[in-house]
Image: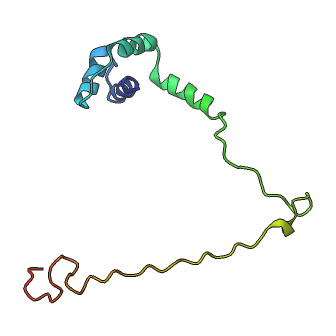
């Protein structure tokens, strides 16, 4: 995946996308190129236009369903009935008790009296 991203960066930068150029981009990012994957990618891309491949991929991906939508709830006429829905009761939160620190600390960890701080 890194190799593909580096190849696309080379192409965007106006370079040819040779193995050395792609490897230089990967190394500039502080990573190490996988020589086997890089050789396969360069071989697969031989004689192909990146822009045409991107356009073809965009055409294919527009038909891919990405889910979403979920089903609707049961209506009153389909047996589910609105009467089956119960009203949600609001939950009562328990109040937390504050811990008594004896009055000897403030937000900054010093004495509560203030007075001598540099803040």
Q: Quadrant of residue 75?
A: bottom right
Q: Quadrant of residue 6?
A: top left
> Residue visible at 56% across and 27% down?
57
> Residue visible at 37% across and 27% down?
2
User: For this rendering, which residue is in front, 99 or 118?
Assistant: 99
Q: Quadrant of the N terminus?
A: top left
> Residue visible at 15% across and 83% down?
111
User: For this rendering, which residue is in front, 66 or 45?
Assistant: 66
In-image side of 96 versus 109 (left or right): right
Residue 47 visible in image: no
Residue 22 drawn at (x, y percent) = 31, 21
> Residue visible at 47% across and 25% down?
51
User: For this rendering, which residue is in front, 97 or 14?
Assistant: 97
Q: Is residue 66 above or below residue 41?
A: below
Residue 42 visible in image: yes
Q: How many marks?
A: 0
Q: Is residue 98 above or below residue 59?
A: below
Q: Is residue 21 above or below residue 94?
A: above
Q: Quadrant of residue 24?
A: top left
Q: Is residue 52 above or below residue 115?
A: above
Residue 119 drawn at (x, y percent) = 12, 80
User: For this rendering, which residue is in front, 77 or 9?
Assistant: 77
In-image side of 52 versus 1 (left or right): right
């Amino acid at each position: 995946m890194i190799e593909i991203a580096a190849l696309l960066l080379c192409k965007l930068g106006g370079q040819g996308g040779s193995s050395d150029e792609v490897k230089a981009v990967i190394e500039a990012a502080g990573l190490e190129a996988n020589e086997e994957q890089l050789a396969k990618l360069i071989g697969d891309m031989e004689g192909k236009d990146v822009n045409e491949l991107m356009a073809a991929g965009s055409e294919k991906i527009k038909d891919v369903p990405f889910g979403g939508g979920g089903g609707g709830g049961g209506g009153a006429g389909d047996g589910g009935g609105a009467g089956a829905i119960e009203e949600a009761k609001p939950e009562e939160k328990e109040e937390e008790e504050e811990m008594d620190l004896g009055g000897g600390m403030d937000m900054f960890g010093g004495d509560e009296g203030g007075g001598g701080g540099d803040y």
